[in-house]
Image (cartoon, rainbow, N blue to C red):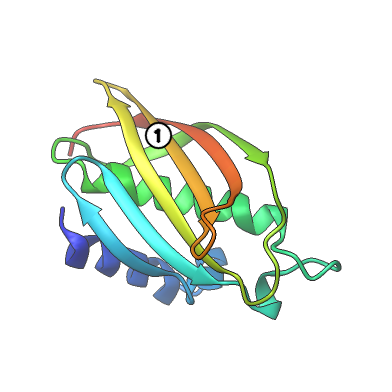
Amino acid sequence: MDLKGVTGILQKMIDHEGHDTILKKVKIVEANDKGTCIAELTVEKEHTNIFNTLHGGYIATLVDIITSLAILAHPRVGKGVSVNLNVSYLKPAKLGDELVIEGTTSKAGRTLAYLDCKIYIKSTKEIVATASHCKFIRED
């Protein structure tokens, strides 16, 4: 699936008006058939915790969604559900920070996909969080 297809899926998720509406400011900038999805986000007040840094739950949501879009971009993989999501929080992201979220497919097997994610500050390349995501998948 290409960039247009992945962007369309994200828009459908946002338009559903459920939890995924919190992703309305996320911009997909790259998606390819290697199972990669790259997005960008500027941290705004609505994304922060009481300390005015990016909320850990929002980071986990970014990991979940961007890696899920990465596996959807993979040529032979269909829908899936999360089996495990592990996030390491390394540095706070502050209001106004421009972030890059990179989701990559490490392995897409018959029933399981292993994905990695890295979130970093665009200008300095300082890593905010790293994550691994395992999904049960099925071919469509």
Q: Which residue is mark 1?
A: 115
Relative to residue 104, is residue 42 drawn left or right?
right
Q: Residue sitting at 54 percent across and 37 percent down?
A: 131
Q: How many numbered discs sit on the rendered protein?
A: 1
Residue 14 x %, y %:
43, 72
Could you classify mark 1 by the number of other residues whose Cα lies within 10 Å: few (under 14), some (14-19), or many (20 or more)?
Answer: many
Residue 137 x %, y %:
32, 32
Relative to residue 111, is residue 103 drawn left or right?
right
Q: Residue sitting at 16 percent across and 45 percent down?
A: 33
User: Considering only vertical position in the picture, is 124 above or below 17?
Assistant: above
Between 133 and 127, the one lying in front of the other is 127
Relative to residue 113, is residue 63 drawn left or right?
right
Residue 94 x %, y %:
70, 68
Q: Residue sitting at 19 percent across and 40 percent down?
A: 34
| Quarter of the image that includes the C terminus | top left
Which residue appears farthest toward the right when viewing the image? Answer: 50
Which residue appears farthest toward the front when viewing the image? Answer: 124
Which residue appears farthest toward the top when viewing the image? Answer: 110
Q: Amino acid at mark 1?
A: Leu
User: Considering only vertical position in the picture, is 44 above or below 71?
Assistant: below
Q: Quadrant of residue 5?
A: bottom left
Relative to residue 114, is residue 7 drawn left or right?
left
Residue 77 x %, y %:
21, 36
User: Considering only vertical position in the picture, is 81 above or below 19?
Assistant: above
Between 73 and 98, the one lying in front of the other is 98
Instruction: Determine the secondary structure under disc 1.
Output: strand
Q: Quadrant of residue 29?
A: bottom left
Q: Residue sitting at 68 percent across and 54 percent down?
A: 57
